[in-house]
């Protein structure tokens, strides 16, 4: 099992009649507390797609998340645990949320692993600032 897609987004919606997901503000990579105070606890919306090589494997889905800063492990947990691929399905997608506490402003690395802890990580780099970064009049 491997992570095919992972991204943070402003919003993610599933359209059951079309069997697809729609997202806005995709690829969000920078966050800031509104009051500029730390630690900063943020609930992030994500979209995740997993792919498996064989449809015969019925192992439960587990995706772990590690938050690392300057080589130090800040947080470790799971964003998916106990789900299963549908019979005969090679792809599995989910839109969800995860809450992460950032202790200070700076650069962080999210390491996601599908399956066992020895799997190669999917790396997602983010920055946390004390002020929102904006494009034009819009602040993130």
Image: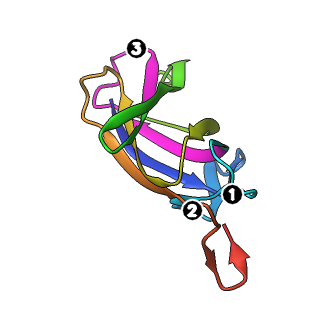
Residue 72: image quadrant is top left
Q: Which residue is mark 3?
A: 58
Q: Is residue 58 above or below residue 8?
A: above
**Under tag 3, what secondary structure?**
loop
Disc 1, SS: loop
Structural crowding at the residue carrying mark 1, measured as other residues with C-alpha within 10 Å and reported as few (<14), some (14–19) or many (≥20)? some
Which residue in the protein does label 1 denote? Answer: 36
Residues marked 2 and 3 touching at CB (< 8 Å): no
Dot 2 surroundings within 10 Å: few (below 14), some, or many (20 or more)? some
Magenta extent: 43-64
Q: Earlier in the sequence, mark 3 or mark 1?
A: 1
Foreground mark, 2 or 3, reads 2
What secondary structure is marked by label 2? loop
Q: Is residue 84 magenta?
A: no
Instruction: Calculate the distance from the C-alpha at mark 2 to the C-alpha at mark 3.
Output: 31 Å
User: Is the residue marked by circle 3 packed among few (<14), some (14-19), or many (20+) residues within 10 Å?
Assistant: few
Q: Quadrant of residue 101?
A: top right
- 86 or 34, which is in the foreground? 34
Q: Which residue is mark 2?
A: 26
Alpha-carbon span between mark 3 and mark 1? 45 Å
- Residue 117 location, x and y as percent? 30, 22
Name which residue lies at 40% across and 14% down: 58
Above or below residue 113? Residue 23 is below
């Amino acid at each position: 099992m491997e992570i095919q897609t992972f991204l943070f987004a402003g919003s993610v919606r599933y359209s059951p009649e079309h069997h697809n997901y729609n997202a806005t503000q995709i690829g969000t990579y920078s966050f800031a507390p509104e009051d500029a105070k730390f630690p900063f606890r943020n609930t992030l919306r994500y979209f995740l797609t997993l792919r498996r090589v064989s449809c015969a494997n019925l192992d439960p889905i587990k995706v772990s998340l590690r938050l690392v800063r300057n080589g130090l492990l800040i947080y470790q947990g799971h964003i998916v645990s106990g789900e299963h691929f549908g019979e005969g399905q090679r792809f599995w997608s989910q839109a969800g949320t995860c809450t992460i506490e950032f202790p200070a402003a700076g650069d962080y690395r999210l390491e996601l692993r599908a399956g066992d802890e020895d799997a190669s990580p999917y790396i997602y780099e983010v920055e946390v600032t004390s002020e929102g970064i904006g494009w034009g009049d819009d602040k993130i």
